[in-house]
Amino acid sequence: MFKIFNILLFTIGMAYSQSSDLIFSDGNEYYNNNQFDDAIEAYESILNRGFYSVDLYYNLGNAYYRLDDFANARWSYEMGIIKDPRNKDIFHNLVLTKQKIPNTLEIPDSKILNMINNFLASFTYGDFIFFSSLMFLFYSISFTLYRMTLSTYLVGLYYCFMFLFFLGTSFSVIKFLWEENNSFGIILNDETQLYSAPFLNDDIKISLFFSGNKVKIEQTTDRWLEISSMDGRKGWIRLEDIRTLE
């Protein structure tokens, strides 16, 4: 019975996957025919099914960009960068999109901070895990060979791999903590109101955010998000006004 259940789940998964591939092809055809609204509907339906890929985020961003919806275009490119930090095409389009967004809020210029953020953003958590695993494998091989041959050359080699293993492990932990404590979102609606508390009340309005800006998410409720911006503002916005990068 359990085996039949697994086969059934596998069959359903394959059917959904093939269906998503067909929808993706339809979306690409819509895009090539300048039917950008239809292309977006097709791409978004794939995301709603729980499937995603770098190409999907890239094409979705391009479709939103062609409709001058720079907020959703930025969200799409940012999601693509999260999945593939070294994708030059997505990064290039992200830069172009940010130039189209008025009153863009950016991280304060700091060479050290920028270097750290750029380094961590250039690799995924999986990249650091893979590097650590590879270094541990090389360390194990070199240590085994040293025990067999007692070669002094191999002593330095396995110490080097051991150091790289611990370095990779440390960066894996840092990347994990960095992602856990750095949740962001893109403001969707123009003139999004920032409140000092999670209530709709004119007396607690603080300021406005414009669509396309990236903010940090501090905490969430059912309908509200507490956010902080790159210029130091902090407050609450409605959940419907933002699209989270997760």
Image (tube, rainbow, N blue to C red):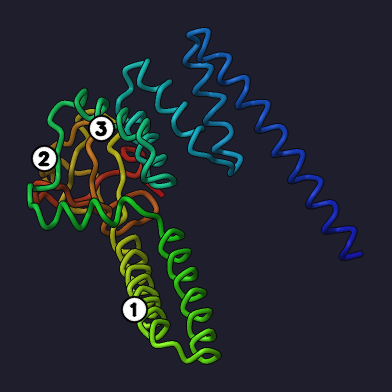
Q: Is residue 68 found left or right of 161 in the rendered image?
A: left
Q: Give amino acid for label 1.
A: Phe
Q: Secondary structure at mark 2?
A: strand
**Callout 1: helix, strand or loop?**
helix
Please tell me whether mark 3 sits on a helix, a strand or a loop: loop
Q: Quadrant of the N terminus?
A: bottom right
In the image shown, does 241 or 7 lie closer to the viewer?
A: 7
Residue wearing tag 3: 212
Q: Residue at x 41, y 50 (%)?
A: 246
10 Å crowding of disc 1: few (<14), some (14-19), many (20+): some
Q: Which mark is residue 163?
A: 1
- Measured in 3D between alpha carbons, the distance from the residue under mark 2 to the one under mark 3, in whole angstroms, is 16 Å
Tell me the residue that label 2 is attached to: 207
Q: Nearer the viewer, mark 1 or mark 2?
A: 1
In the rendered image, the vertical position of residue 225 relative to residue 166, given as above or below = above
Of label 3 and label 1, which has the lower sequence position?
A: 1
**Residues packed near mark 2 inside 10 Å, few (<14), some (14 to 19) or many (20 plus):** some
Q: Say which mark, if any, is on residue 192.
A: none
The three-letter code of the residue at mark 3 reads Gly
